[in-house]
Amino acid sequence: MSEHVALPGKLGDPDRTLGTDPRADSRLVAALAPLGLAGAPEPVPLSADATDQEIYEYTATIEPGFEMLFDLIYADLPAVEGVESRTEVITGVDGNDINLYIHQPTGGSGGPRPCILHIHGGGMVILKASGASYVRWRDELAALDLVVVGVEFRNAEGALGPHPFPAGLNDCTSALEWVHANKADLGVSKIVVSGESGGGNLTLATTLKASREGRLHMIDGVYAQCPYISGAYWNPPMELTSLHENDGYFLSSEMMGYLVRAYDPDEENLTNPLAWPLNASVDDLRGMPPHVISVNELDPLRDEGLAYFRKLVEAGVTVSSRTVNGTCHAGDVILRAAIPEVYAASARDLTTFAHTC
């Protein structure tokens, strides 16, 4: 008689939380529990027929909370040594100013080096590249002998909004063009586009847009972390199992559904690969540069990242994937102090890819 095998996450127990899931890294849980982020999420205070204004007010409320969270997480860390940074202001394709935050090893000698064009998370709706967690990530990568350029793209809502799709994507494209045109001055040998969560979306979308518009030669590699790319959060398909298995673990499908509305208010782009890259066809992906798709085991978004990886394999792209076990959405990028070895492993993997792709 075969033994009963319990299903993982909320598939096995609908009351399970990140804090009670036996797969969760206990160090991660210990860091998130005092912040109220290891238990069941609070319901989103919106109705299914919420107006655009109500969604705008909701995102304006949650953005400061996330910024304060990241400030708290990074408050006691010592500065990264051997790194210098500056800000370059460029003009985007839409005529707007874009801040680029450039981090590199002190002195600028020893180049040329690979460049990470980094695109931050926040669902393309909230947060800033100037936030504490993203400054730290760029510094840590620069200390590993990289040039890192962070893009302060326009958000769909929040302090850098309201600029729905495709404003942020246009800004990332403008940043790519500027970095490519200034490779010699920056001491850059190659360009890898990378980002996490909403930044993972824009990483893949920037690459798809480059392919469509004859710009793909500018990109030498793509490294997407926990990419937010399906847009299918109101009624998650069962084939994206993790949207059911890990729903409410740091992220909820309900919250993400409202962020989709913020990014594309009329929901006219739900099948557009430039808005939601999981809609890209295998033919869309042929001829792409090398990719890495990194996902988190306990992330609702895990399986959409893996589905994109499988499409890349089918398209014949040089690609690998990695799953960071025991971690919630972007936990390996956010929780620098709680799980330093995990954070360092992800930074090293991106660095190795940048040097060898």
Image: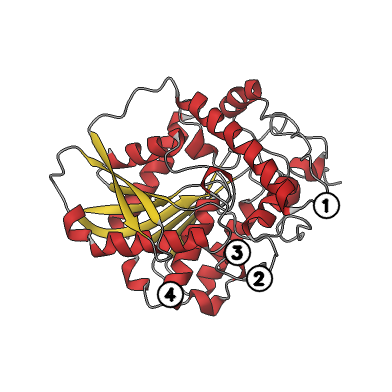
Earlier in the chain: of badge 1 and badge 3, it is 1
Task: Say the numbered circle drawn on residue 211.
Answer: 4
The amino acid at mark 2 is Thr
C-alpha distance separating marks 1 and 3: 21 Å
Element on which disc 1 rests:
loop
Earlier in the chain: of badge 3 and badge 2, it is 2
- Residue drawn 71% across the image and 59% down it: 232
- Residue drawn 71% across the image and 49% down it: 53
**Residue denoted by label 3:** 276
C-alpha distance separating marks 3 and 2: 7 Å
| x then y, percent, for residue 12 | 81, 42
Q: Are marks 4 and 1 in contact (CB under 8 Å)?
A: no
The amino acid at mark 4 is Ser
| x then y, percent, for residue 246 | 71, 44
Earlier in the chain: of badge 2 and badge 1, it is 1
The amino acid at mark 1 is Ala
**Left or right side of 277 for 180:** left
C-alpha distance separating marks 2 and 1: 21 Å
| x then y, percent, for residue 227 | 55, 54
Q: Is residue 140 above or below residue 2?
A: above
**Residue denoted by label 1:** 48
Observer-side mark, 1 or 3, equals: 1
Q: Nearer the viewer, residue 276 or 283?
A: 276
Numbered label tally: 4
Task: Say the numbered circle drawn on residue 271.
Answer: 2
Earlier in the chain: of badge 4 and badge 1, it is 1
Way the structure is coloured? secondary structure
